[in-house]
Image (spheres, rainbow, N blue to C red):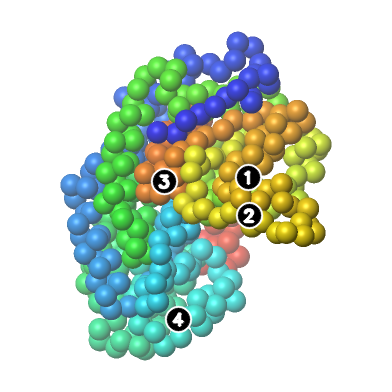
Amino acid sequence: MVKVDLSGAKSFFIGNGPDYSAAAAAHKVLAERTGAGADFLGWPALPAKIRETELDRIIAAADKIRSRSAALVVIGIGGSYLGAKGAIEFLKPDSGAGDTRVFFAGNGVNPDSLYDVINQLGSCDFDVNVISKSGTTLEPAVSFRIFRDLLNAKYGSKANDHIFATTDAKKGVLKSLAEANGWESFVVPDDVGGRYSVFSAVGLLPMAVAGIDVKKLIDCAVEEFKSLDERNESNPAWQYAAARQNLYAGGKKVELLACFDPKFRWMAEWWKQLYGESEGKDNIGIFPASVEFTADLHSMGQYIQEGERILMETVVRFDECLSALEVPYENSDADGLNYLAGRDLGEIGRVIENAVIEAHISGGVPCMTLTVKKRNEEGLASLICFFELACGISGYMSGVNPFNQPGVEAYKKNMFRMLGKPGAV
Ligand code: PA5
């Protein structure tokens, strides 16, 4: 489980501090499915369900792709790609020469980015996993048409065997196309929204192709959601949700998710979508932002320390690094670093983390820390389950429906009108 430390936020809390009775009430509404968006509460049961249903087929499909192709192109946007991208970057499974590479496309319409993927594919064998719950999202649909052309040109009548579709069980253009062409298909469950779908085939197929032990990940997630069902103040999801809502009420409008491990960068992107799309509505909501330390201390550090005092900071920490590297001793000590000689970089990093947290608190930034043991499958499952549950609780505490995204339609309406889609006004 994630360990939450609120000591660095304590002096900033307003009123009586985090409202755990509100967190308890929000958790109850979520668990009993009595609140807004209750039709999209299938995600806490998703790991257990996927283990019983599609997991073996996902692993078999991944094995097939890994055995025959140098690359998998994953086409999707938002919740249909960020979880897999985040997990793959986070775990970075050892990719030896000849291992299947995973590329992401369709998360925009920039031709240069698409060309970049196409160029990297070169003449190698590849498969495509197109992911869209609605099956109608323009950006992935356009990319998919381009990659279908490439597959047809390369594999001719065998092209359909290289396409894997992850979409709605019953409806949508992608579902119809998959059925008509005989593509192997996986399901985005009806009761799971895109940004909560990482433990479905949406996240798991790309992860498995990248070499992640998805069985282990899912086993850990099943246990994690069980532990997070605890209904008292020691529930870390309650602590985080209640603390951030209290800080928000006290004027801390922006939450900076910080991590000292650059491999967390894409998980932070996943987190931003999860929280931004879930909470930013009805003209309220904490703005989720992220920083990567120590690099960003030399770019954003000034603002964090002395800019407008609207920030709260959440630092993701790991008890252990995966590797050890010592600072070497040098006789001359010309660079004056012998005071660090023999010390492990991981240990030095943890000292720096403490120094940064102390500085930010003294500069007026409340700081919460979230700690897991290691950057491995277990740590990843802990973080995902924790963030998902805390997000649902936090959203309900603030009075919004954390499971819809009505605001996303505004740009689409203009886009379709301006692009001349038939029927668009
Ligand atoms: O969380 C969400 O529902 C969204 O971010 C979607 O994942 C995103 O818009 C992509 O939608 P779709 O999977 O329908 O193409």
C-alpha separation, residue under disc 2 versus residue under disc 1:
10 Å
205 or 32, nearer to the observer: 205
Whether label 3 lies within 8 Å of ligand 1 gets the answer no
Q: Which residue is mark 1?
A: 348
Q: Are marks 2 and 1 in contact (CB under 8 Å)?
A: yes
C-alpha separation, residue under disc 3 versus residue under disc 1:
24 Å
Mark 2 vs 1, N-terminal side: 2
**Residue mark closest to the camera, 2 vs 4:** 2
Q: Are marks 2 and 3 in contact (CB under 8 Å)?
A: no
**Residue mark closest to the camera, 4 vs 3:** 3
Judge left or right: residue 191 versus residue 20: left
**Residue mark closest to the camera, 2 vs 1:** 2
**Which quadrant: the N terminus?**
top left
**Kind of residue at disc 2:** Val
Who's the residue at 49% across and 80% down the image? Answer: 120
**Kind of residue at disc 4:** Leu
Q: Which residue is mark 2?
A: 327
Q: Which residue is mark 4?
A: 121
Q: Which residue is mark 3?
A: 380
Mark 2 vs 4, N-terminal side: 4
Mark 1 vs 4, N-terminal side: 4
177 or 24, nearer to the observer: 24
**Residue mark closest to the camera, 1 vs 4:** 1
- The 10 Å Cα crowd at callout 3, few under 14, some 14 to 19, many 20 or more, is many
- The 10 Å Cα crowd at callout 4, few under 14, some 14 to 19, many 20 or more, is some
Whether label 2 lies within 8 Å of ligand 1 gets the answer no
Where, by quadrant of the figure, is residue 110 drawn?
A: bottom right
Mark 2 vs 3, N-terminal side: 2
**Kind of residue at disc 3:** Leu
**Secondary structure state at the residue bearing disc 4:** helix
Residue 45: horizontal and vertical position, in percent?
A: 28, 38
**Kind of residue at disc 1:** Ile
